[in-house]
Amino acid sequence: MESKIGIIIPQGWRLDLPATVSPRDQFLLIVKTAHALEELGFTSGWLYDHFHTYPLVKEESVFEAWTTLTALAMATERLRLGTIVTCNSYRNPALLAKMASVFDVLSNGRLEFGIGAGWYQQEYEGYGYRFDPNPDRIRMLGEAVQIVKELWTSGRCEFEGKYYSLKGALNFPLPVQKPHPPVLIGGGGEKLTLRVVAKYADMFNTGGDLETYRRKLQVLANHCDKVGRNYEDIRKTYMATVSLGREQGEAERKIGELASYFGGLEEFKKKHAVGTPDEVARKLGEFKDLGVSYFILYFRDAHQRRSLELFRDEVMQRL
């Protein structure tokens, strides 16, 4: 089966937009990248749901995900669009269900709904959100996905949980996609998050090295058995940074600064795909052999198009 390939569009969160141009020109660069993805035949374009830069906090542009996705939906025709991933804590789930429904209508059924429990404590505190303990945030995620799905399918929701209470929330228009847009849940926590994935997700997303990913799939399969879910019904997706070059040295130079914030180049290469087309195809192919059928990849230089073309021409057909 040919893999689906999604590309994370540089939006500023990872200090990946040129700081020397105006915000308007930065936005036009985001649109240009989405156009390139559509023209080159990629499945989807994705945005991070974050508000200020990472791994360094700087006073530079970061384009908010849902606002920007809406603009990209108006600028494209076929490209599927999603968040990798929406932080559940940043928006009430009933409001999020409404936003997602309207987005699916205006994009004519192109939403990929990515959601997770949230993790960026500095951002939570900076924006005045309460940073609850991990178990609470994950259980909130489970409740939220139930609410979103109910509002998507019936248009109405009564809900009384530990974290959320809804009294007759309405959601019209309903999404275009039936029974609802695909729900991708991101995260790798083995006790709680993967249980939420087993219960509610259409797609599972995480990153990491090969053995870690293999273990996550085994744990997910165990959770599926316990909750009575068919493991094969959940599409496995893999997220990684790709730095591609005609020679290994070129690929390493392009990613060197980013890698320096994550343990150095050699450590970075264990969890990401850095190298020539042959090397990148081999690395990603190992994950395909584990059952991955959807790759969601970040190219720091995606707005320059050259790496995307090289990937399309020499890697994509091998996945």
Image (cartoon, rainbow, N blue to C red):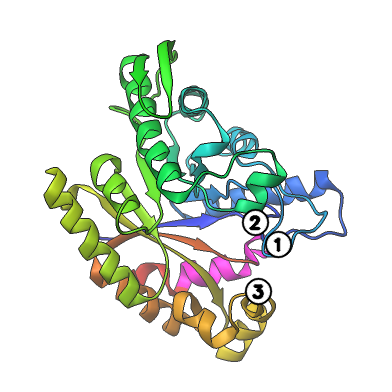
Residue 258 image label: 3
Closest to the camera, between mark 3 and mark 1, is: 3
Question: Mark 2 belongs to which amino acid?
Answer: Pro
> Which quarter of the figure is the C terminus placed in?
bottom left
Question: Mark 1 belongs to which amino acid?
Answer: Asp
Q: Which residues fall within the magenta stretch?
A: 301-313
Helix, strand or loop at label 1? It is: loop
Whole-percent x and y of residue 299? Answer: 58, 66
The residue to which callout 1 is attached is 16
Q: Residue at x 37, y 26 (%)?
A: 147
Whole-percent x and y of residue 100? Answer: 48, 29
How far separated are the C-alphas under marks 1 and 2? 6 Å
Whole-percent x and y of residue 65? Answer: 61, 41
Please state if 317 lies on the left or on the right of 59 as rendered.
Answer: left
On the question of residue 30 being in view, the answer is: yes
* Labels in figure, total: 3
The residue to which callout 2 is attached is 10
Q: Are marks 1 and 2 in contact (CB under 8 Å)?
A: yes
Q: Nearer the viewer, residue 122 or 151?
A: 122
Q: Nearer the viewer, residue 132 or 185?
A: 132
Helix, strand or loop at label 3? It is: helix
Main secondary-structure element of the magenta-colored stretch:
helix
Question: Mark 3 belongs to which amino acid?
Answer: Leu
Which residue extends farthest top? 168
Between discs 3 and 2, the one toward the N terminus: 2
Between discs 3 and 1, the one toward the N terminus: 1
Whole-percent x and y of residue 232? Answer: 17, 52
How far separated are the C-alphas under marks 3 and 1? 10 Å
Question: Could you classify mark 1 by the number of other residues whose Cα lies within 10 Å: few (under 14), some (14-19), or many (20 or more)?
Answer: some
Q: Is residue 223 magenta?
A: no
How far separated are the C-alphas under marks 3 and 2? 14 Å
